[in-house]
Amino acid sequence: MSTSVAVEHVFAHARLELARRERAVPFREIKAASRDCAPARDGLAALLEGGCSVIPEIKRHSPGQGRLRDLDTKAAGVLAAELEEAGAGMLAVQTEPHRFAGSLEDLAAVSAAVAVPVMVRDLIFDPYQIHEARVHGADVIPLIADYLDADRLAALVDRAASLGMTPMVEARTYPALERALAAGAEVVGVDARDPVTGEVDRGLLAEITTGLPESVARVALSGVRSARDVLAYASAGADAVVVGQTVMTDEDPAACVRTLSAAGNHPACPRRVTAR
């Protein structure tokens, strides 16, 4: 695992926060609780339904942009239901508390408010976090291949799958994409935003996923500002796009999602050649 100083600082905070939560609820307890949850919703099936679905990311704050929207936990659930009604194929929820002002309570509120699958958005590197996310209603779990060695990545993919969850392995390089496939990932995410510089490269998805097996779902993260961007990502092979800032800063988030979803479901929108 190779990380920059900035990313290692984020990891340090995440490890401290994880240790705090594990002291409050030991691993054995959170693991048992996750096994008693209702079955996870099928994230992979939702991604392969056709067209390019929109996954709004509910978050209050962004490290680069500051405050995005004032929401308490109850309001997050209400907003999620509105976005589902507007056409969201899945919801994403930021749970990281320090940089994004998120919480696991937000995740639980959103999961309880919608019928579509819910993706947790956080830095996941430990089995505890996977069981914890399942307890709070997550159906899809993100794993960043660039930050995890091959053995740890494969173990976390297996752990998520054992709970009926859909692992989405994020990759920004060819070696990371190869590790994702070797770990058995059926969903690959490509974040257009560089985690260190913040620069957005919308061409990265097409660049590193060309030749990817058709059975693997592709999710584009970052860089969606308009319906045109949804269509461009779909043309590059995306089955879905995660949209955070554009939705959360819009005066009418539901109307924004409705417009983006209409583009992703338009007959002219490129679609995958084969279905799983």
Image: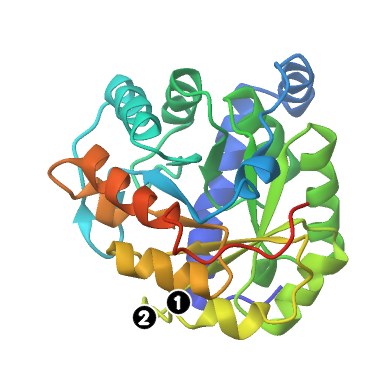
Q: Is residue 222 left or right of residue 123?
A: left
Q: In this rendering, does residue 18 appear at all?
A: yes
Circle 1: residue type:
Asp
Is 177 above or below relative to 138? below
Relative depth, front residue between 140 and 256: 256
Give the x, y percent position of residue 271: 58, 62
User: Cα distance, mark 1 to mark 2?
Assistant: 5 Å
Is 157 above or below relative to 109? below
Give the x, y percent position of residue 129: 65, 39
Q: Which mark is residue 199?
A: 2
Give the x, y percent position of residue 63: 31, 60
Q: Is residue 235 left or right of residue 25?
A: left
Mark 1 closeness class: few <14, some 14–19, many ≥20 residues within 10 Å: few
In terms of secondary structure, where does tag 2 sit?
Answer: loop
Quarter occupied by the N terminus: bottom right
Instruction: Give the image quarter of residue 40.
Output: top right
Q: In this rendering, does residue 223 appear at all?
A: no
Which residue position is annotated with label 1? 194
Q: By what rule are the colours in the image chosen?
A: rainbow
- Give me the residue at 49% from left, 41% from top: 89
Circles 1 and 2, Cβ within 8 Å, touching? The answer is yes
Is 56 above or below relative to 66? above
- Give me the residue at 42% from left, 73% from top: 232
- Give me the residue at 44% from left, 26% from top: 110
Instruction: Give the image quarter of residue 130.
Output: top right
Q: Earlier in the sequence, mark 1 or mark 2?
A: 1
